[in-house]
Image (cartoon, helix red, strand yellow):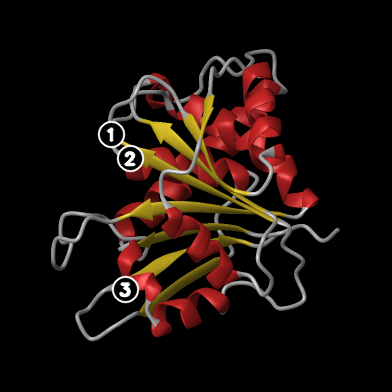
């Protein structure tokens, strides 16, 4: 099965339900790609631990992810559907309705290493027909001037810094010094939901910079969809 991309989407989700938003979503997935299941990775301030919400299907993917995360030390509960809109989003992006749609909702307050470890846990799903969508949902507050967008230099420079740090840590792990000189910021707790989702997306993308940057205007009220794609 062809390896599916990883997508990071930054948007006001209610804007995606309109015809223009749905058309923009369909442009992100090639028609020849076979998407069996869809997993959304989101984040919300607070919370004691990540949670899995089963949106539709038999729950096989949800339980498999729960088991895989437990092996890495994450105690994750599986609950019933909380938000029917994610199922509709998944169907908008794929050409056939997926068998199962789940949401992995991250809590804030863990370190970047924890979020990247979660990404490593999910990475194998790309080869198993699971489309992974890191969804950074914006609040409906007009122009969202306080929320950094993927096109902003701040976010792009941050990912470039992460990539450089990963290369440095990888090189140091092969030396006598080991990887003990990794960035001290990797141990600091993250309070921003956007950075929680971005760290996970970066890990899912193989710890590399995204190969694709996209942005679409969704309606006349300036609501937009922007994001990254890790295609390889």
The answer to whether residue 134 of the structure is visible from this angle is: yes
Q: Is residue 101 left or right of residue 48?
A: right
Choose mark 2 or mark 1, whichever is in front: 1
SS for dot 3: strand
Q: Residue at x 42, y 59 (%)?
A: 85
Q: Residue at x 41, y 50 (%)?
A: 83
Please state the horizontal and vertical placement of residue 36, each as a whole percent of the image: 73, 58
Q: In the rendered structure, find residue 224 and report the number of the disc placed on it.
A: 3
Q: Pointer 2: residues within 10 angstroms few (<14), some, or many (20+)?
A: some
Q: Which quadrant is home to the N terminus? A: bottom right
Residue position for label 1: 45
Q: Which quadrant is home to the C terminus? A: bottom right
First reached walking from the N terminus: tag 2 or tag 3 = 2
Please state the horizontal and vertical placement of residue 152, each as a whole percent of the image: 31, 62
Quadrant of residue 170 in the image? top right
Q: Nearer the viewer, residue 206 or 32?
A: 32
First reached walking from the N terminus: tag 1 or tag 3 = 1
Quadrant of residue 161 in the image? top left
Q: Nearer the viewer, residue 165 or 100?
A: 100
SS for dot 2: helix
Q: Is residue 95 left or right of residue 128?
A: left
Q: In the rendered structure, find residue 193 and report the number of the disc placed on it.
A: 2
Please state the horizontal and vertical placement of residue 122, each as a whole percent of the image: 65, 38
Evaluate if marks 2 and 1 touch, with contact meaning CB atoms under 8 Å apart.
Answer: yes
First reached walking from the N terminus: tag 2 or tag 1 = 1
**Alpha-carbon span between mark 2 and mark 3:** 19 Å
């Amino acid at each position: 099965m062809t390896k599916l991309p990883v997508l990071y989407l930054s948007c006001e989700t209610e804007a995606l339900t309109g015809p223009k938003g749905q058309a923009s979503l369909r442009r992100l997935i090639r028609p020849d790609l076979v998407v069996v299941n869809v997993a959304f990775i989101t984040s919300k301030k607070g919370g004691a631990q990540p949670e899995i919400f089963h949106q539709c299907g038999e729950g096989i993917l949800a339980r498999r992810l729960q088991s895989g995360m437990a092996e890495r030390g994450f105690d994750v509960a599986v609950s019933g559907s909380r938000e029917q809109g994610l199922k509709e989003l998944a169907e908008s992006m794929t050409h056939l309705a997926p068998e199962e749609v789940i949401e992995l909702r991250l809590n804030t307050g863990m370190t970047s290493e924890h979020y990247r470890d979660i990404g490593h846990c999910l990475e194998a799903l790309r080869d198993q027909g699971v489309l992974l969508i890191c969804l950074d949902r914006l609040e409906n507050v007009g122009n969202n001037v306080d929320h950094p967008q993927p096109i902003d230099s701040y976010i792009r420079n941050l990912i470039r810094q992460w990539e450089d740090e990963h290369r440095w840590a990888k090189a140091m792990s092969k030396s006598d010094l080991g990887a003990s000189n990794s960035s001290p910021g990797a141990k600091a707790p993250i309070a921003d939901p956007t950075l929680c989702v971005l760290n996970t997306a970066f890990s899912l993308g193989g710890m590399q910079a995204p190969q694709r940057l996209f942005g679409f205007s969704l309606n006349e009220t300036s609501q937009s969809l922007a994001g990254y794609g890790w295609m390889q």
